[in-house]
Amino acid sequence: MDNIIKISLGLLIVILLAFISVVGYHGFVESAYLNSLSSTYSYTCTITTDSTLSNVTLFIPVPADPLGNSPIVAGFSAHAIAGLPDDWTVTLYDTGKATMARITTRAITPPGETNPTTPFTLTLSSEMQSDTLIDTREPIKNSALFHPVRELQPVACPPASSLVRETPQCYRYVTSLYADYEAAPDASVNITSTIVGRNSWNIFEPGFNEYTSVTSLLMSGSHDGWATMNGTLASGIGTYDTPLPST
């Protein structure tokens, strides 16, 4: 009888220790996740040209969610966009369907050595911290994109890297940009904008999930009017085996 009691007590102690270990492990994992979690939006816009552009007016889409909330608007409003030239005037417009940055300047003048093989590139960039977890699985519904998003179509994703543990979802779409400037007939102008929403953390090793969207437009000679930008979107990149819901 004493042996049975001793064995029972031993089993109870083992079960209790196992329970405490599991609870402690999950508590550590959750704490490590929350303490290291960082959610950021990274925005870049590049304007590449091989010729001087004069009397420039651009309406460039600014990434925003479907409700019009934009993580990048604050950067433009505070003139905190890196690379923004001092002689550019930037005004933000909410059209109801999109948030646009109206950029005006008397000229974009490349350095003298610029030519078609070595064009001049201006890069605007901003990284903004998000107070909430970014929805990287369904950014079309909940996160910042270049609006209006039109003709959205699913497409095959490029080969995934070893860091991607789930199957990403990829799309192509079109959006709009306004450009008015004078240039030589053979001038080449390329405008590309990128938004990346990323959650990152460290539980024993670094982890992340993200989405990325890129829009671009290539123009020749002078331009005056609205034009269509081609866009791509890749969502659900990375891993989602975190201790808390990812959305």
Image (cartoon, helix red, strand yellow):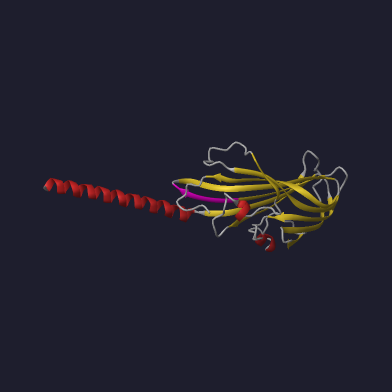
The location of residue 190, given as percent across then percent down, is 77, 46
User: Which one is nearer the viewer's eye here, 51 or 95?
Assistant: 95
Q: Main secondary structure of the magenta part?
A: strand
Residue closest to the far left? 1
Q: Is residue 147 left or right of residue 8?
A: right
The location of residue 237, given as percent across then percent down, is 57, 44
The location of residue 232, given as percent across then percent down, is 67, 45
Q: Residue at x 65, y 48 (%)?
A: 213
Q: Quadrant of residue 156?
A: top right
**Is 166 within the magenta?**
no
**Is 202 within the magenta?**
yes
User: Which one is nearer the viewer's eye here, 222 or 231?
Assistant: 231
Which stretch appears magenta?
A: 197-203
Residue closest to the far top? 159
Q: Is residue 5 left or right of residue 219?
A: left
Q: Residue at x 77, y 43 (%)?
A: 119
